[in-house]
Image (cartoon, helix red, strand yellow):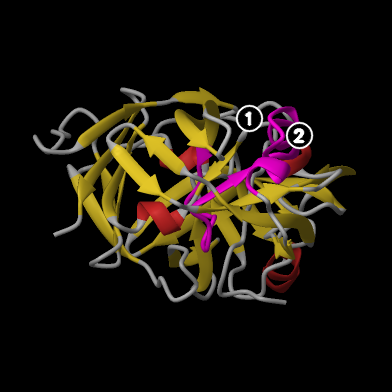
Amino acid sequence: MKLAGALVVTLVLPVLAAPPQQRSDAAVEIPFDFKTHQPIVAVRVNGGRPVPFLFDTGASINVIGDALAQEIGLAAGGPPQSITGGGQASVPVRYADAVTFSANGNEWSRQRAAVLPISAKHYSGFIGAPILMRYVVQFDFQRGVVRLIDPQRYQPAAGAMRIPFELQADLPVVRAQVDGGNGPIEARLMVDTGAGGVLVDLNRPFVDRHGLVEAMQATASADRPAGIGGTAPFVYGTARQFTLGGVVVKNPRIGLSRATHGSSSRAERDGVIGNQLLRHYLTTFDYQRRLLLLDAAK
């Protein structure tokens, strides 16, 4: 399985809100490893050893891999449910409550987490929306740090592009334009820091509705590894242009889903934007103001 490339993890699960916690600092910095083109942070679960976790704007709930849960003796309750993620296979999931996560001296207690099999081998879980939405979350890909900023004290950089987003199941979704050769089309795309090797991937209903496989003469195919549910089939083609706010990408290589199950087979969104675009910017998610800010990396 190719793990250093595009791993699309889009998880939409019910969330049990955790009570607010106090923060003494306006901002904290947490280092991450970007070797797999994803922000991987050393996290402790319930005070255990540090293990790699993905800081994932594409996860609507915190996730703990079942192998790690077994290692630390974490009890997950209730009958197993069946869900799909970025891959096509369904996986069983249970839920654990009163979980404590910590990273670089910062602690988040009384968290709920989904416990399920994780396909990827280079991380053991996700830090998702229940924690990230408390902050303005800034990914500094050049320095390899994620900043968690008090929303009341955050001041956007004057030169940053400001792109509105809406929240769908606590996931940030922007409006962009894709021109596959048959004219510009508006697309609702989730901004996903879990999508490592991805610039833009489009979901199958959107692809089929607009005839993009034919318009882009997409021929190259591959099974895209995902963090949840194995793989999903994609074909790849070159579009004429992709536009997001003030960002214009000429002749981008775009993934076109051919999946029949999993997140890329569904129509509630049209696709994802991943780190092959985001890594060129100081990328900030202001959840309170519903703004994605892109500041050109110096």
Q: Residue at x 72, y 47 (%)?
A: 257
Q: Which residues are magenta?
A: 190-216
The quadrant of the rendering that contains the C terminus is bottom left
Q: Nearer the viewer, mark 1 or mark 2?
A: 2
Where does the image place residue 130, in percent across and percent down from the top left?
Answer: 51, 38
Q: Which residue is mark 2?
A: 208
Q: Residue at x 74, y 63 (%)?
A: 221
Q: State the image quarter where residue 123 is shown.
A: bottom right
The answer to whether residue 18 is seen in the rendering is: no
Q: Amino acid at mark 1?
A: Arg
Vertical comparison of 69 with 235: above or below: below
Decide: few, some or many residues near mark 2? Use Cα within 10 Å; few <14, some 14-19, many ≥20: some
Asked if the magenta segment contains residue 196, the reply would be yes
Vertical comparison of 284 with 177: above or below: below
Q: Which residue is mark 1?
A: 269
Q: Amino acid at mark 2?
A: Asp
Q: Residue at x 52, y 70 (%)?
A: 52
Where does the image place residue 113, in percent across and percent down from the top left?
Answer: 64, 47
**Residue 84 in the figure: left or right of residue 50:** right
The Cα–Cα distance between marks 1 and 2, rounded to whole angstroms, is: 14 Å
The answer to whether residue 232 is seen in the rendering is: yes
